[in-house]
Image (cartoon, rainbow, N blue to C red):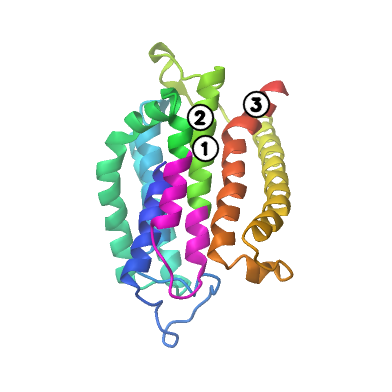
Amino acid sequence: MVWVWVMYLGQCTKDVIGWSRPASPPVVKVEMFYNSEYSMPSTHAMSGTAIPISLFFMTYGRWEYPFTLGVSLALCWCLLVCLSRIYMGMHSVLDVIVGVLYSALILLFFLPALDLIDGFNLTCRYAPLIIVSLHLGLGLFSFTLDTWSTSRGDTAQILGVGAGIALASHVNHYLGLLPDPTPDQLPFAVPVFSAGLVGMAILRLFLGVLVLMTTRALMKAITIPLVCRVFRVPSTDVRKARQHMEVELPYRYIVYGAVGFNVLCLVPLLFSYM
């Protein structure tokens, strides 16, 4: 939830402000994939701030680990991501500073509301309908682009993943899967690292990624031709077809909604059977 809202607000703010990437020269651009996007604020800096801070906020007290270790890891993560964006030539120092401060401001208001939002996603009978409508509506009405860039598709992809994960959490709660621990079970002790634990983690990662890659490939193969046919967009050149808003938004939303759902529902279910 934190990742979705921080990235969504960051992407929309970029397109409203409309600042260009740093000029080259003098900047040497090491990465060119996102060069068509605007620059202010840095959404990498925003996610690089929000994710480690929120992970620390949500795990400290739930798991037994030193406070200083958690803070140090969060700060190092944030610093490395922010410096990398300057090194890659994608952002100015000002872009990164504003990204960090903007993310901190969002977290200030959003973290206290997480339990309330999560409770709604889990227990409200109308949650699936509202989740789908809200995330789809945000993607459709948030902003328009003068020219195509990667930001619109990325925003739809982020919202799709968020909707899929929220739906999966509702289904898990309804079916009694992945129940929350009782207060007397907390805090959890961090397991001792061993060859068996590392091997199990690698196996779970491999199988989980395999399921998600299969989901993504199947859904893309089905969704893109179907959406092109519905909106009568020529599909001979798939790359150009995907740049049409009426194709890009539903295809990204559906494909990555399925991926997000499988992350939290199908993959853990598969592990429990194995």
Q: Nearer the viewer, residue 117 or 126?
A: 126
* Disc 3: which residue: 269
Residue range in magenta is 132-156
Q: Is residue 50 above or below residue 142?
A: above
Q: Nearer the viewer, mark 3 or mark 2?
A: 2
Residue 34, percent across and down?
A: 51, 70
Q: Position of residue 247 (x, y in %)?
A: 59, 60
| Disc 3 to disc 1, C-alpha distance | 14 Å
**Is disc 3 placed on a helix, strand or loop?**
helix
Q: Is residue 73 visible?
A: no
Against 97, residue 4 (above or below) is above
Labels 1 & 2 near each other (Cβ < 8 A): yes
Q: Which mark is residue 169?
A: 2
The type of residue carrying mark 1 is Ile
Q: Which image quarter holds the N terminus?
A: top left
List the residue tagged with mark 1: 165
